[in-house]
Amino acid sequence: MEIGLMAIVLILGVVAAAVAVSLVTLGRRRGEQKPPPSLHSPADTEQEVLRLLQQGKTIHAIKIVRERSRLGLKEAKDLVEDVAAGRGRLTDHPAFAGMRPSLPRRGTGDLAGRVRNLVAEGHRQQAIYLVRGETGMAEDEAERFITSLTT
């Protein structure tokens, strides 16, 4: 009788441990956020992307760009394709603006002033990239932010 009771207690302990591990894992998944942008410089990122493209690893290049710039999948893919086709440089893309302290600033030094200037010059998409790059906002959040500044 004691062996049966011990077996039941042991089984209940194992089940309780499994449930606890599952809850902790589930909690981590729900609370997952995008990691902050990488501390790699835009030039380092561009070199790595070019190396990956030369190796035919376009998907890996897109992944690196997404991780280090917080661009969405389509935007990162378009950027990598432009770089691969020689239509632009990764280091010139506005998504990397927050990573370059030497980036020339127009008008006021604050983000709102720079966004207003870009929109006034007809560069709304660049303003979106700038806001996303410096704040980590999603595209729709950045668009709402820009609309609130310019209306």
Image (spheres, rainbow, N blue to C red):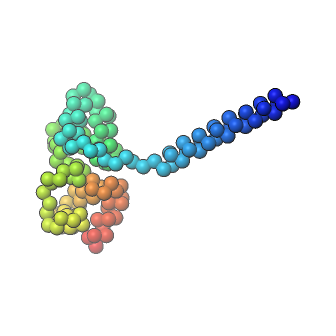
Residue 54, horizontal then vertical, whole percent: 21, 28
Q: Residue furthest right?
A: 1
Of residue 112 and residue 15, the one placed in the foreground of this image is 15
Query: In the image, is residue 59 above or below residue 73?
Result: above
Q: Residue furthest bottom?
A: 151
Q: Is residue 128 visible?
A: no
84 vs 132, left or right, is: left
Q: Residue at x 32, y 34 (%)?
A: 59
Query: In the image, is residue 63 above or below residue 138?
Result: above
Q: Residue at x 23, y 35 (%)?
A: 49
Q: Residue at x 26, y 28 (%)?
A: 56
Quadrant position of the N terminus in the picture: top right
51 vs 11, left or right, is: left
Residue 68, horizontal then vertical, whole percent: 29, 44
Residue 21, horizontal then vertical, whole percent: 59, 40
Q: Is residue 72 visible?
A: yes
Quadrant position of the C terminus in the picture: bottom left
51 vs 63, left or right, is: left
Q: Quadrant of residue 77?
A: top left
Of residue 114 and residue 36, the one placed in the foreground of this image is 36
Residue 87, horizontal then vertical, whole percent: 16, 42
Q: Residue at x 16, y 47 (%)?
A: 92
Instruction: Give the number of marks.
Output: 0
